[in-house]
Image (cartoon, helix red, strand yellow):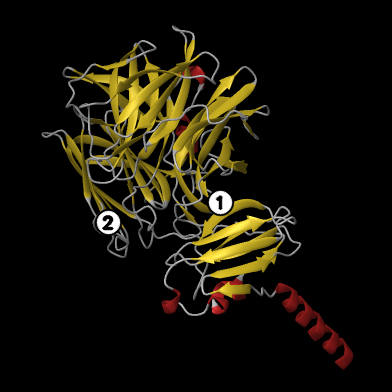
Amino acid sequence: MKKLLFSLIAAMVVSLAKAQVTPMVLGDKHAMLRTQTTKFVLLPVQETEEIASIAVLDGRNEMVQRLNVKLAVDRVDYYVPYELKGARLLDIEFHGDRRQKGAVGEFVCWKEMKFSDTFDTTNREHFRPLYHHTPLYGWMNDPNGMFYKDGVWHLYYQYNPYGSQWENMHWGHSTSKDLVHWEAQPMAFEPDWLGSIFSGSCITNGSDVVAFYTSAGHHQTQSMAVSKDNGRTFKKYEGNPVLTSSKPDFRDPNVFWHEQTKRWIMILAVGQEMQIYSSADLKAWKYESSFGQEYGCHGGVWECPDLFMIGDKWVLLCNINPGGPFGGSATQYFVGQFDGHKFTCESMPKVTKWMDYGKDHYATVSFYNAPENRRVVLAWMSNWQYANQVPTKQFRSANSIARDLGLFTHGEETYVSVVPSKEMLALRGAKVKKPTEACEIVVDMKGQTEIVLSNTKGEQVVMTYDAAKQTFAMDRTKSGDVSFSEAFPCVTVAPTYGTIKQLRLFIDRCSIEAFDAEGKMAMTNLVFPSEPYNTIKVKGGKATIYQIEN
């Protein structure tokens, strides 16, 4: 028995010895680490720390990648995996004042760093949505390159796999057959020596899928890549970049085919305007025109454009940060005509139209080649004022539910209508008496209406429809945890452009999306209640609650 016990202890010691990480400390801000023969190194992250720059070297001591990670100094918030793929040495430079942090060799990251063949992505977050798209782990912002092909919806997105705050921009990738259930796919794009991979778009050209994206290095340039396997993998074009500029903000290419001129069109965000280019071969691009001077809101940088036709009119989406109606980021749009060369807005320059009047709806873009001539969009469900601080760690950010766009008129203006995509109806389950953490609430309005969602902790969201003023408001000042940012507690107010007869509310753990059933109003707000809202009180209307079955 003693011999067996000794053998077990010896095996444990050997195992622990293999697991130990011993850095080569080269200075007060510099260390190197040799890797082990596992698939991953699991990097411990502490979000309040300064970034550590990691150069990844192969067996020939050639750098294959550079990444920025907030390596843990005195505590571990969570782990992120780095797939070694032949990497043999990590050359790590720490930043910040080391006199306040102690000796590099004593940092907790060396004690907690692990080499492993697996990484557990099991959800550990109280606020992870049940039916909204989220990354398995890490940070996500703008949806990118969305397209529909052969029955599959493809969603790419701005992604940091090495932390749950913005950094190291890649393109992540997920696919769906119903716009609701998403399957994580391998990484689409990693940064290269032209820079990080910023936002862009995809088009289908015959059997190929062609992606356009911004390479964000010392300057922002536009690059191209081609997929021969329906968007699963891409080969970057050897002639990149395909378009350059001296402008500091020159990004987010959105490309589509213009049938009348038989040309490809690219619309780009450039500072506080949109620039339009055309091409016959997707490689050589000709400047056509600019739009934006004096039109709409200019409270921040214009980003993530989209330009498409609905009916007999054209819609130009313009995401802006900051400058939103209630602070931070938001989506504005313009309605007019496009002749293949120039976009002409039909409204007066000072008219500003917002697609969503909540705080948490940004980077809205549409799917290329959606079926049935539909215009389907997704948005990033957060706000740059506090996106890096919301109370989750394993992941940060979700996308909105899918929405279909149309047009309606009110007075002398044409507006974009927004309704939940029809695929959401398939999620409706049984009627229930009380709200749950994942449900749809349909409220039939009789005029002046107040809706209060609350829980046993005294947390509540108050929604008010003022029929006389034609406004809808949502108050989340007492909705739960609002402490992480002074910009978070707020009341958002939307015009309703007429009466609301029926309101549809989509609730999913950390979000409330409100829609006029006819599409004339949309409002998206995050909430972080300590327990789900389980009570609803309605004055001036009747609520029907459907459990959402995902």
Q: Where's residue 61, x and y in %?
A: 70, 57
Q: Where's residue 354, x and y in %?
A: 26, 33
Name the one closer to the observer, 538 or 487.
Answer: 487
**For the residue labelled by badge 1, is the local secondary structure a helix, a strand or a loop?**
loop
The residue under label 1 is which amino acid type?
Leu
Name the one closer to the observer, 23 or 473.
Answer: 23
Q: Is residue 532 left or right of residue 354?
A: right
Residue 504 higher or lower than 367, as above or below: below
**In the image as oriented, which residue stretches furthest toward the top?**
260
Name the one closer to the observer, 95 or 1.
Answer: 95
- Does label 2 or label 1 sit earlier along the sequence? 1
Please give the residue where the numbered disc 2 appears in the rendered image. 460
Q: Is residue 162 visible?
A: no
Q: Quadrant of the N terminus?
A: bottom right
Residue at image point 49% right, 63% down:
70
Please give the residue where the numbered disc 1 appears in the rendered image. 136
Residue at image point 45% right, 55% down:
165
